Image (tube, helix red, strand yellow):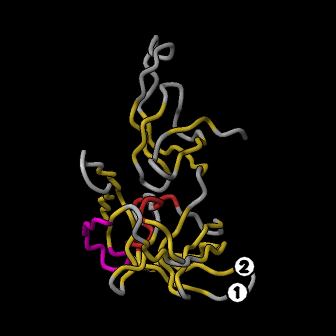
Amino acid sequence: MKINAINIRPGNVLEYEGKLMQVTKIDLIQPGKGNAVIQVSMKDVRTGVKTQNRWRTQETVERARLDETEMQYLFKDGDQYTFMDNESFEQIVLNEDAIGDPAVYLQEGMVCIVTMHEGTPLSVELPQTVTMAVVEAEPVVKGQTASSSFKPGVLENGAKIMVPPHIEVGTRVVVNTGDGSYVERAKD
């Protein structure tokens, strides 16, 4: 669908020169004289190559039509991740690059949102939070529990995270999948 360049937002996917380009950053430039322009930083969804382009704000650009499908994560084989559509039972395989850093938080059976363009999977969005057990944490230092300091901990998936001092080995915690930060102690 066509949109005015002024309506481009970070995260949008544009069809540009026969490629799918994801917008990473925008800057609106309004010179004292002349038309305003929008400077758009983009990266190719398939190759990761970054580029920049400028459009006058009233120009139109082609926004890609994307479909979002709920899919269940099944298993990992090397750096390949297999997902299944719960309605059609069709399976797709995605490379680790399509998922990015949150891939470490994938758990078997987890339902994720897979973004697709004309049947080709582009990216995976995990649930906002995930519950995991802490397998390694420094012992509590007496008197430290009242302060707002954090200590390093290791989750069952091997990811390192900063946790409050009262968290011990075996405690289940809720983790933000977007940035890998501690949210709260899991309610059992």
Picture quarter with the N terminus: bottom right
The location of residue 149, given as percent across then percent down, is 42, 22
The location of residue 184, given as percent across then percent down, is 59, 35
Identity of the residue furthest to the right in this view: 87
Q: Amino acid at mark 1?
A: Phe
Image mark for residue 89: 1
Q: Quadrant of residue 8?
A: bottom left
The location of residue 9, given as percent across then percent down, is 45, 58
From what the image shows, is residue 165 above or below residue 91? above
Does the magenta-highlighted stretch encompass residue 110?
A: no
Classed neighbour count for the residue bearing mark 1: other residues with Cα under 10 Å, few (<14), some (14–19), many (≥20): few
| 19 left or right, relative to 87 | left
Q: Quadrant of residue 26?
A: bottom left
- Front position in the image: 13 or 68: 13
From what the image shows, is residue 161 above or below residue 5? above
State how many labels appear.
Answer: 2
- Residue lying at 57% horizontally and 49% vertically, measured from the top left: 132
Does the magenta-highlighted stretch encompass residue 47?
A: yes
**Residue ID for mark 2:** 86
From what the image shows, is residue 53 above or below residue 150? below
The location of residue 174, given as percent across then percent down, is 59, 43
| 42 left or right, relative to 88 | left
Q: Quadrant of residue 175?
A: top right
- Front position in the image: 143 or 7: 7
Q: Amino acid at mark 2?
A: Asn
Give the Cα separation between the discs numbered 2 and 1. Answer: 5 Å
- Residue lying at 30% horizontally and 48% vertically, measured from the top left: 30
Q: Which residue range is magenta in the image?
A: 44-55
